[in-house]
Amino acid sequence: MKPYLTILLDSFRMLKARAIFWVTLGISLFVALIYLSIGFDEKGMSFFFGLSHFESDNFRAGTSASETLYVAIFTKLIAEYWLSWIAVLLGLISCAAIFPDALKEGAAGMILTKKLSRIQVFLAKFVGSLLFVTIQVVIFVAIVFVAMRWRLGSWNPSVFWCVPLILLVFTYLYSFMMLIAVKTKSVMTALILTLVLWFVSSIVGVIEGQLYEGIQMTEMMDESRRVVDQQAQAAQVQVIPNGEEVPMEEDRDPEVVEEFPATESERSTSSSTLKLWHKRMVAVYAVFPKTGRTMEVADRLLVINGKKGIAKGSFSVIMMRLAFEGDEGDDEYLEVSEKSADRHSTGYAIGTSLIFALVMLVLAAWIFCRKEI
Amino acid sequence: MSDYVLDLSGIRKTYRGGVEALKGIDLQVPRGCIYGLLGPNGAGKSTMIKILTTLIRKSGGDGTMLGKPIGDRRTLQKVGLLPEHAQFPDYLTGRQVIEFTAGLQDVAASEVQKRTDTLLELVDMTEAEGRKMKGYSKGMKQRIGIAQALVNDPEIVFLDEPTDGVDPAGRRDFRLLMKRLREEGRTIFINTHILSELEPIVDRVAIVSHGELLGEGVLDDLRSRKPDYHVEYEGALSPTTQASMESGGLIVSSGLITMSTSKAEDVQPVIDQLRSEGLVVSRVERKTQSLEELFMGFVDQSNVAVPPPIPGAPIQPSFLPPS
């Protein structure tokens, strides 16, 4: 056990010795402080500890809308952008050198020639790397936890779900980075290829999501159209998408027919094409780590107004929902967006990503154990 | 259990790309000696240490270290190592580096501080123990490197180019330290090409070149294999005698005759001849090779190019004169 702890302690010392550790911590504290500075009073919202004020009937102290907004600022802006992008990126940069450094000729002799087997060293270094993200995120979330108590008047321990979720996101990417690092022993190569993977997986995820939303929108429009067509058929007229009523099939304008897939078969072809491409993208996306989807799991776990998982969709969607409170059902976009947020289960998003990470880790460990120095 | 701390047989290493770093090395290292592994750059010395300390895998051959097969992890707990071009974490202090190795080698917590103190004193680094490694000179780093190699109270210590970058005072201290470790019963395996460092302290040497073991044994025995006798005289030798001696393979220079022999009786006729000519024999000395001469002799021999056989030519026994 002692040799493990020695490597963990060394990892901590190494990270502590790096300027980027303190820079990241400093920025984290700054962001947390900004969050802490947002408050609510009887008249509305205040920013920067009251320096700036915004009057609002909806977002006043004690309203459920203000609580939703405050938590949404954390989940949708801070966690989704700062924690899951910038903090993870800084974490990757900080830890990029750990394995290449360990495999340098003069350094390897210090660690790999001792009692611990290589696989044990590998695991200890891996866990040591996770320390970086853990320390950063725990400090940050702890401040957010205190901020919520201060601003909303109640403790919300569900924010700590962000810690394991960020660690998962980091693990997906770091496992790939470790594989490249032990293979090439190059910090830059490992970092660049990891960023490429991250970018590609995000793009694939966005495309898959857009296709899904496209299908949903098509189906909704299709359904609306079917209802309208049925009503029009009864009235012996045809309705084109701008709402105009025209005579039945024999008198239709050919340009209108071409431009709008008015018939059921035309609409069906369009929907099938979307579904086919979506199916393909789902297959491609399955093998990629789902960093964005993993962070979205926080939406399902965070408690707002005493309920779990109501902050679905993007920040703008939540703002729209808060704005349209009492008038819901009109906005199809909101419905599609919420459906899209639910399109993959937590188990699928995290499970497939963990399989990816596990494969990367096994490969990296195998290379690390076989590496000649 | 083998009497040897290291017992290697036919150790081979072929790197990817076909480079043969070791071509079947047989080596036996007795317990409690200072053993020098000598060889020019690229001879395979570091490859040997890397195989023994599991940094690389052997391609063939067998061997034991401290009675266990090479690569046994528990055995490595009894081994100390100062690798070549050792890179210590520059964010650690000298003391922390020693404690770090102690932790990796699972040294009991109660022992760590005491041993670290002792070793820092031993390598004369007590005053600088709290400074970060990045602030140390090369020699100071090597001192810490030697100290960390000893923190687990090892039975065998591998030192790869240990005096690289160390100043003369440090080298003297190093020699004294090696002697002390030998007195404590440890085996010191030193890999170096700085022969003058090794000569005063080494018990046995192995000379490696191009991955092959050229010679191995007790240093004094190896040096005695090709001794010279030096006969110094006063006066002028007659031209006839000088010519006669030179034709007999002796080297005659002003006031000195050098004979390549290990037998004292071979020298007697020369002394008689000098006396018969009325010359004064001022000194007769049996000279052995220095380690450097021994080393160069082996290496030069190995570098003598053997002409490749002419394709199709009949193989001729070496004792027959060329046809």
Image: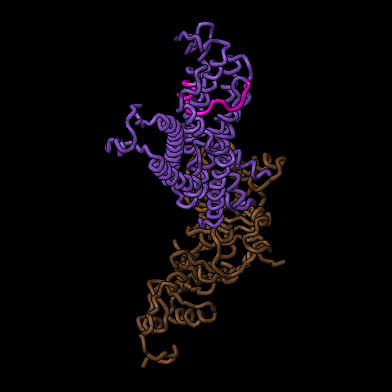
Q: Quadrant of the N terminus of chain A?
A: top right
- Name the image colouring: by chain
Any part of residue B185 in sight: yes
Q: Position of residue B54 (x, y in %)?
A: 58, 58
**Rendered position, A186 above or below B1:** above
Residue pushed farthest top?
A42
Residue at x-position 49% and y-position 11%: A45
**Rendered position, A343 above or below A245:** below
Where on the picture, by quarter, is residue B218?
bottom right
Q: Residue A312: within the magenta?
A: yes
Q: Residue B42: within the magenta?
A: no
Figure chain in purple: A
Direction from residue A223 to residue B5 in the image, left or right: right
Please state which of residues A327 and A137 is positioned toward the viewer in this rendering. A327
Please state which of residues B164 and A323 is positioned toward the viewer in this rendering. A323
Residue at x-position 38% and y-position 39%: A263
**Which residue range is magenta in the image?**
A306-320
Q: Position of residue B75 (x, y in %)?
A: 67, 57
Q: Position of residue B39 (x, y in %)?
A: 48, 64
Please state which of residues A235 and A303 is positioned toward the viewer in this rendering. A235
- The image shows a total of numbered marks equal to 0
Please state which of residues A63 and A183 is positioned toward the viewer in this rendering. A63
Direction from residue B3 to residue B127 in the image, left or right: left
Residue at x-position 69% and y-position 66%: B3
Q: Position of residue B319 (x, y in %)?
A: 45, 90
Where on the picture, by quarter, is residue A11?
top right
**Rendered position, A362 above or below B4:** above
Q: Colour of chain B?
A: brown
**Rendered position, A165 above or below B81:** above
Direction from residue B42 to residue B34 in the image, left or right: right
